[in-house]
Image (spheres, rainbow, N blue to C red):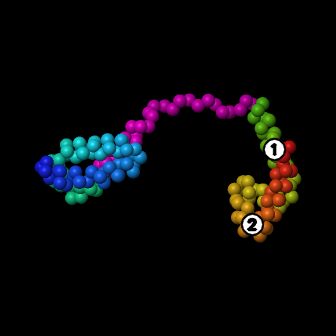
């Protein structure tokens, strides 16, 4: 490929290549560097570029791979630093287990309707409107019942 042909076929695609690089890298200077690296690579491959039917697609594919390489190079390599152990000491673990069992007993002592509503609201993460649609109760009634259940669970 001649230099003039390179200028007429490949250089007009610079704006498109920049947009692709910026979309992937999300950084202006990195995108410019990636496009510059792409053009260096294309220039070094100029003897083989006559075989390319769609320069925009081929250049975008090469650019995508260059951008991925840049992203990978940003990641830290090597082993991750050790994280301190978050395991509670045995006495704290026992205390937590006993507190959980006490709460579970209190939940079992609630009326079945409050248990059901509390589970839907807290465990299932449903909104009052969703619970209303599912149970047929009014949202205000559901709020009152969930509030009463929570008050009974407080120490």
Mark nearest the camera among 2 and 1 is 2
Task: Write down the region rendered in magenta.
Answer: 61-90
Left or right of 45 on screen, residue 97: right
As drawn, the label of residue 35 is none
Q: Are marks 2 and 1 in contact (CB under 8 Å)?
A: no
Q: Position of residue 35 (x, y in %)?
A: 29, 45
Reading the image, the residue beneath label 1 is: 101
- How many residues crowd around disc 1 within 10 Å: few (fewer than 14), some, or many (20 or more)? few
Q: Nearer the viewer, residue 54 or 36?
A: 36
Label 2 element class = helix
Quarter of the view holding residue 135: bottom right
Q: Nearer the viewer, residue 60 or 112?
A: 60
Q: Is residue 144 visible?
A: yes
Q: Position of residue 53 (x, y in %)?
A: 21, 58
Reading the image, the residue beneath label 2 is: 132
Q: Is residue 115 visible?
A: no
Label 1 element class = helix
Would you say residue 75 sits in the magenta stretch? yes
Q: Position of residue 148 (x, y in %)?
A: 85, 55
Would you say residue 69 sits in the magenta stretch? yes
Residue appearing at x 77%, y 70% in the figure: 136
Could you tell me how far apart the alpha carbons at marks 2 and 1 are, in whole angstroms? 30 Å
Mark 2 vs mark 1: which is more N-terminal? Answer: 1
**Vertical relation: 17 (above or below) 30:** below
Residue appearing at x 29%, y 52% in the figure: 15
Left or right of 148 on screen, residue 29: left
């Amino acid at each position: 490929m001649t230099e003039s042909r390179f200028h007429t076929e490949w250089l007009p695609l610079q704006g498109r290549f920049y947009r692709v690089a910026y979309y992937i890298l999300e950084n202006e200077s990195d995108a410019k560097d990636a496009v510059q690296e792409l053009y260096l690579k294309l220039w070094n491959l100029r003897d083989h570029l006559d075989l390319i039917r769609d320069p925009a697609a081929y250049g975008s594919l090469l650019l995508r791979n260059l951008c991925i390489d840049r992203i990978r190079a940003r990641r830290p390599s090597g082993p991750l630093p050790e994280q301190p152990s978050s395991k509670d000491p045995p006495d704290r673990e026992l205390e937590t287990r006993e507190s959980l069992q006490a709460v579970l007993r209190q939940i079992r002592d609630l009326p079945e309707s409050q248990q059901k509503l509390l589970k839907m609201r807290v465990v299932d993460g449903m909104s009052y409107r969703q619970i209303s649609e599912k149970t047929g109760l009014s949202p205000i009634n559901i709020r009152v019942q969930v509030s009463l259940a929570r008050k009974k669970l407080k120490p």
